[in-house]
Image: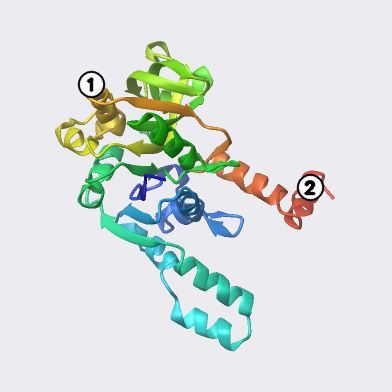
């Protein structure tokens, strides 16, 4: 695999999840017994990206703490003979090399990616928006990296979405080059339905060319007054190819209450013990 670094923008305030996100980072909300962020980190690692860069903010110390060692807890578990839990704690803190960079102002996704320039400027790098949690046989980031390795250039994940949802996303125009692979010719961030160039929406996985950084620096605020990654990618199209991959797998938008709850139910249904609990509650037993 050619892509070794993966950037996680995690500075967002999680307003769609208030009040719980007043004090808890949205990335730390649980999916069964693990925080949302750990799913993204595992996806990056199993896609060959061993260097993780988190673009974080003031209220996100709990993310750093989660991936750090906790000597007190480890010592306690060890002394009480709770071997499995002790090993689980060690595994989490040994999972990855994680570097944290502060995004000092909430200027948008494009700005968050730009904050990663000092560490990502020399090579293609992955981006995972951890709100989008995927359940798939092949990790979705890895599906993108495979296309990058074969066709070169930047790659984004795509999903065909229903018309009433299209204005929530970045939307592309393009032609199908191979089954499930689009050669992108244009893109627009959160268009009105009547302006959407297709029903292919960008989902939270990217493989980006380092050329994106110089374009992000020139980028003016776009939709929502924020510096948009989609706008910089649109500019990138003038110089380098960008492909879209219709990912294979199932996505849960854990940035919304509905998506987060669906993900919890789905993961519980896949667990041999919790499955019966869900079914009992649903069937009113
Ligand atoms: C961001 C991107 C958008 C993309 C979406 C995927 O939007 O700006 O292009 O379609 O993620 O989840 P956000 O969800 O941060 O508003």
Give coordinates of residue 116: x percent, y percent.
25, 48
Label 1 sits on residue:
238
C-alpha distance separating marks 1 and 2: 52 Å
The residue at 28%/39% (across/down) is 108
Disc 1, SS: loop
Disc 2, SS: helix
Q: In the image, is residue 159 above or below residue 79?
A: above
The residue at 54%/41% (across/down) is 134
Q: Residues within 10 Å of mark 2 (few under 14, many from 20)?
A: some
Label 2 sits on residue:
279
Q: Is residue 164 left or right of residue 189?
A: right
**Residues tagged 1 and 2 counted as in contact (Cβ below 8 A):** no
Q: In the image, is residue 208 above or below residue 187?
A: below
The residue at 35%/31% (across/down) is 152
Count of marks placed on residues: 2
Task: Point out the residue furthest to the front here.
Answer: 150
Give coordinates of residue 173: x percent, y percent.
38, 16
Question: Between disc 1 and disc 2, whose residue precedes?
Answer: 1
In this orientation, which residue lies closer to the viewer: 125 or 66? 125
Q: In this view, does 229 lie to the left or right of 31?
A: left
**Quarter of image, ligand 1:** top left
Give coordinates of residue 60: x percent, y percent.
36, 58
């Amino acid at each position: 695999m050619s892509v070794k670094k993966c950037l996680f923008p995690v500075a967002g305030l999680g307003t769609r999840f208030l009040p719980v996100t007043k004090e808890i980072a949205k990335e730390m909300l649980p999916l069964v017994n693990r925080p949302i962020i750990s799913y993204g980190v595992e996806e990056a690692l199993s896609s060959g990206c061993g260097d993780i860069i988190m673009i974080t903010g003031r209220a996100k110390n709990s993310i750093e703490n989660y991936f750090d060692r906790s000597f007190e807890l480890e010592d306690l578990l060890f002394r009480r003979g709770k071997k499995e839990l002790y090993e689980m704690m060690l595994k989490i803190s040994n999972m990855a090399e994680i570097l944290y960079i502060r995004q000092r102002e909430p200027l948008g996704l494009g700005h968050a990616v730009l904050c990663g320039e000092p560490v990502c400027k020399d090579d293609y790098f992955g981006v995972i928006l951890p709100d989008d949690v995927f359940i798939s046989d092949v990790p979705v980031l890895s599906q993108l990296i495979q296309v990058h390795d074969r066709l070169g250039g930047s790659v984004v994940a795509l999903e065909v979405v229903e018309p009433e949802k299209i204005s929530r996303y970045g939307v592309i125009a393009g032609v199908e080059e191979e089954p499930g692979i689009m050669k992108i010719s244009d893109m627009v961030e959160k268009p009105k339905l009547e302006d959407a160039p297709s029903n292919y929406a960008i989902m939270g996985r990217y493989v980006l060319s380092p050329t994106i950084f110089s374009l992000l620096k020139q980028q003016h605020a776009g939709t929502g007054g924020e510096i948009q990654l989609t706008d910089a990618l649109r500019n990138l199209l003038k110089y380098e190819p960008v492909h879209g991959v219709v990912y294979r797998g199932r996505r849960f938008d854990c940035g919304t209450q509905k998506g987060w709850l669906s993900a919890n139910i789905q993961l519980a249904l896949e667990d041999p013990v919790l499955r019966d609990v869900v079914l009992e509650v649903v069937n009113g037993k």
